[in-house]
Amino acid sequence: MGYSLEDRLVIGVASSALFDLSESDAVFRNRGEEAYRSYQEQRLDEHLQPGVAFSFVRRLLSLNDLAQPDDPLVEVIVLSKNDPDTGLRVMRSIEHHGLDITRAIFQQGRSPY
């Protein structure tokens, strides 16, 4: 990750668009933040299923196949209002699905922008 984002297509994507977080969201809405955190911790090794933007992001990242390995054309950054527990699960799911995403921000309820 030792390169500048200048002269690249930089895309920000919500974690809830990249992965299906509807089950997690239902826990948060119905049982509250403490239950939500516990839910995420208990499922840390369960990989999240693709969300609505997953295929689009995968195709965008495939443009990097046309570039030098240390000079990608596209950089995808995950922006999320989720907490760090969900963030760890999201990052593990990114790795599991083979997505070349290394930058993310998890704001624990605060706006990520």
Image (spheres, grey):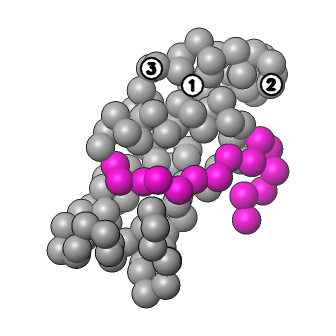
Q: What stretch is highlighted in magenta?
A: 99-113
Of badges 2 and 1, the one in the foreground is 2
Indicate the amino acid at tag 2.
Glu
16 or 105: nearer the viewer: 105
Where residue 23 is drawn, which disc sits there?
1
- Measured from the top left, where is residue 71 in percent x and y? 32, 75
| Residue that badge 3 annotates | 46
Question: Label 3: how many residues lie within 10 Å, few (<14), some (14-19) or many (20+)?
Answer: some
Tags 2 and 3 in contact by the CB under 8 Å rule? no
- Disc 2 and disc 1: Cα gap in Å? 14 Å
Question: Label 1: how many residues lie within 10 Å, few (<14), some (14-19) or many (20+)?
Answer: few
Indicate the amino acid at tag 3.
Glu
Indicate the amino acid at tag 1.
Glu
Q: Is residue 21 left or right of residue 98?
A: right
Q: Is mark 3 on a helix, strand or loop?
A: loop
Q: Main SS type for the magenta part? A: loop
Q: Is residue 96 left or right of residue 4?
A: left
Q: In the orientation shown, which residue stands out farthest toward the bottom?
A: 7
Q: Quadrant of the N terminus?
A: bottom left
Question: Label 2: how many residues lie within 10 Å, few (<14), some (14-19) or many (20+)?
Answer: few
36 or 88: nearer the viewer: 88
| Residue that badge 2 annotates | 33
- Measured from the top left, where is residue 6 in percent x and y? 49, 84
Earlier residue among tags 2 and 1? 1
Q: Is mark 2 on a helix, strand or loop?
A: helix
Of badges 2 and 3, the one in the foreground is 3
- Residue at left offset 25%, top offset 67%: 69
